[in-house]
C-alpha cells in the first residue's frame, strides 16, 4: 500500500515538514520525481535543515528511504547533504537506497540550464539552475547516464561521449564558463555514491508492498509546476502529480491509497509564469515577510497572493486528492480580512476552470471575502480551540473543493499540526 504526499500549488507548500511528521506511520519513504530543485525544510530538535535529494524520512531511525527511478540525482548535492544529515547523528548509509534507474545530473546539465535561461532573456523560466530540465531531456532523449551505469567499466567513456555532445550545445549558446572544478567535484561525488545501496527500485518497493509494508511517496515541486498540467512552459520537467508515483517508483495505480494534497492557506510562486491571485501590494509584502517566503534552494523572494480555489480544484482533480493538509495557516493571523479566489474572469467571462495557457489570456480573479481570525493560532493543538472565523474559512474550502481539509499546520515545528 502506497500513500502520497504532494504539493497542490507552485511548490514550497510545506511538504517536507508534513512528510517528516507522517513518516513515523510508514516503513518506507520514497522520492519519485524531481531533483535538487526541491528544498524541503525540516526542524529536527529545533534545528533547521533543508533537504534537496534525500527523502524527508531520513531522521526517523529504522525507516527505509528510497530515491526512486523518477528522480534526477546530482551526486555533488547528494554527498553534501549526506554530510549535513550526518551532523545530526544520522547513519545515512544504513537506511538510504538509490534506484539503479535514477538518472544522473552531470555538470554540463547545470551549464546547459544556465546557458538556456540566459538565452531566453526576459522570457526565462526562472529555473533553479540545478540542471533539472537538461537532465530530463537526456532521459527522454535516451542519452542520459543512470546510477546503475556507475558500476559499468565503460562509464567514463560514455560520460565523455555525452559531455562532447553537451559541449556542442554549449558552444551554440556561446557559453564560456569553465566547469572543470564542478567536474572534479562530480567524480569525487560519484565515488561516494558508488558506495551506497544501489538497488533495483521497482522490485525493492514491490517486495516491500507484498510484505505488507507501508510506503509514503514524497512529492517535490507542486501540481501547477507539472510538466503536462502546470503552467507550461513555466514548469519543471517532471510529473509532479500522483501519476508520477507509478512511473517514478514502478508501482501500479491500484496500489495507491491516500493522496494527501498539501496547500498553503494562501499561495506562493517562485520563478516566472502566471499567478492570477498574486498580490503586488502591502498585503503581498506582509505575507512574504511574515511567512518568510524566500526560496529554500535559491533564497529568491517568493511571489505571494491569495489562495486560488480554481487552481486547487484542478489540482485535486488530476491527483485524486483524498485529504487536504493546509499549511501556514498561522501566517494569516495578522489579517483582518481574507480573500479566497473562487472564479476567474477570462476576457470578461466567468470561468471556473484553468485555461490552456494562463499567460495568453487576461485573468481577473473573482474573490469571496472572509473575516480574518486575527488572533495567534500557533499554539492551538486541537480543532475545537481554533477560532470560529477559521472554521468558516475551512468549511468553505471543503465545500468548494469537494475534498476535506483534514489537517491544519500552524507553525514550522514538527508537532504544530491540528487534526480537523
Ligand atoms: P516544501 O518545499 O513544500 O517542503 O516547503 P519549503 O520547506 O520549501 O517551504 C515551506 C516553509 O514553511 C519552510 O520554511 C517551513 O519550515 C515552513 N512551514 C511549513 N509549515 C508551516 C506552518 O504551518 N507555519 C509556518 N509558519 N511555517 C511553516
Ligand atoms: P519544492 O520541492 C518551488 C520552480 C522554479 C522555476 C520552475 C522550473 O521545494 O516545492 P527548474 O529548476 O525545475 O528548472 O525550475 O519551477 N521550482 C520550484 N518552485 N518549489 C520547488 O520545489 C521548485 N522546484 C522548481 O522556481 O520557476
Ligand atoms: Mg521547497
Image (spheres, rainbow, N blue to C red):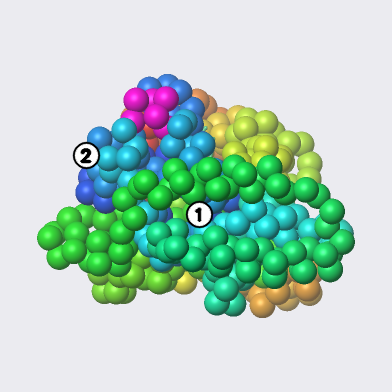
Above or below 343: residue 6: above
Q: Quadrant of residue 334?
A: top right
The residue drawn where x is 55% and y is 48% is 187
Q: Secondary structure at mark 1?
A: strand
Is the shortest distance between ligand 2 and the CB of mark 1 under 8 Å?
A: no
From the image, tell me which residue sits under label 2: 62
What residue is at 67 percent from the left and 37 percent from the top?
299
Residue 197: percent from left, percent from top: 31, 50
Find disc 1 in the rendering and name its residue: 73
Sequence-first tag of 1 and 2: 2
125 above or below 227?
A: above
Which residue is nearer to you in this view: 184 or 106? Answer: 184
Quadrant of image for the C terminus: top left
Task: Using the rendered image of the protein, determine whether residue 257 is visible from the camera's viewpoint.
Answer: no
Residue 375 at what x, y percent from top left? 52, 27
Residue 86 in magenta stretch: yes
Measured from the top left, where is residue 35 in percent x and y? 53, 54
Disc 2 secondary structure class: loop
**177 or 46, which lies in front?**
177
The residue that appears at 59% across and 39% down in the rendered structure is 296
97 sits to left or right of 225: left
Q: Nearer the viewer, residue 226 or 108?
A: 108
Which residue range is magenta in the image? 85-90
Amino acid at each position: 500500500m502506497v500513500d502520497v504526499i504532494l504539493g497542490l500549488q507552485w511548490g514550497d507548500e510545506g511538504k517536507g515538514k508534513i512528510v517528516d511528521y507522517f513518516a513515523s506511520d510508514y516503513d518506507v519513504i520514497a522520492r519519485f520525481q524531481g531533483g535538487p530543485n526541491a528544498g524541503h525544510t525540516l526542524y529536527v530538535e529545533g534545528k533547521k535543515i533543508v533537504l534537496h535529494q534525500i527523502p524527508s524520512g531520513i531522521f526517523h531511525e529504522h525507516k527505509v528511504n528510497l530515491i526512486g527511478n523518477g528522480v534526477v540525482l546530482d551526486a555533488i548535492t547528494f554527498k553534501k547533504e549526506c554530510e549535513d544529515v550526518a551532523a545530526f547523528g544520522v547513519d545515512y548509509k544504513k537506511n538510504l537506497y538509490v534506484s539503479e534507474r535514477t538518472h544522473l545530473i552531470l555538470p554540463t546539465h547545470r551549464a546547459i540550464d544556465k546557458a538556456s535561461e540566459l538565452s531566453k532573456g526576459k522570457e526565462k523560466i526562472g529555473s533553479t539552475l540545478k540542471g533539472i530540465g537538461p537532465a530530463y531531456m537526456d532521459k527522454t532523449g535516451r542519452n542520459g547516464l543512470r546510477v546503475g551505469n556507475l558500476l559499468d567499466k565503460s562509464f567514463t567513456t560514455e560520460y565523455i561521449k555525452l559531455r562532447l555532445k553537451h559541449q556542442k550545445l554549449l558552444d551554440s549558446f556561446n557559453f564560456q564558463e569553465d566547469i572543470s572544478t564542478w567536474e572534479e567535484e562530480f567524480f569525487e561525488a560519484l565515488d561516494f555514491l558508488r558506495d551506497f545501496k544501489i538497488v533495483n527500485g521497482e522490485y525493492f518497493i514491490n517486495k516491500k508492498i507484498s510484505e505488507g509494508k507501508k510506503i509514503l511517496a514524497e512529492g517535490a515541486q507542486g501540481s501547477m509546476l507539472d510538466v503536462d498540467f502546470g503552467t507550461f512552459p513555466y514548469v519543471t520537467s517532471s510529473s509532479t502529480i500522483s501519476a508520477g508515483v507509478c512511473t517514478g517508483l514502478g508501482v501500479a495505480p491500484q496500489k495507491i491509497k491516500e493522496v494527501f494534497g498539501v496547500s498553503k492557506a494562501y499561495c506562493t510562486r517562485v520563478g516566472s509564469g502566471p499567478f492570477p491571485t498574486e498580490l503586488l501590494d502591502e498585503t503581498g509584502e506582509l505575507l512574504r515577510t511574515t511567512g518568510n517566503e524566500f526560496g529554500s534552494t535559491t533564497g529568491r523572494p517568493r511571489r505571494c497572493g491569495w489562495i486560488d480555489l480554481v487552481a486547487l480544484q484542478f489540482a485535486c482533480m488530476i491527483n485524486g486528492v483524498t485529504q487536504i493538509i493546509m499549511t501556514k495557516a498561522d501566517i494569516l493571523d495578522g489579517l483582518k480580512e481574507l480573500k479566497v479566489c473562487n472564479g476567474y474572469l477570462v476576457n470578461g467571462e466567468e470561468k471556473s476552470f484553468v485555461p490552456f495557457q494562463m499567460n495568453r489570456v487576461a485573468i481577473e480573479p473573482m474573490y469571496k471575502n472572509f473575516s480574518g481570525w486575527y488572533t495567534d493560532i500557533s499554539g492551538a493543538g486541537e480543532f475545537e480551540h481554533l477560532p470560529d472565523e477559521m472554521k468558516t474559512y475551512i468549511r468553505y474550502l471543503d465545500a468548494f473543493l469537494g475534498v476535506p481539509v483534514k489537517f491544519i499546520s500552524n507553525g514550522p515545528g514538527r508537532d504544530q499540526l491540528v487534526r480537523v
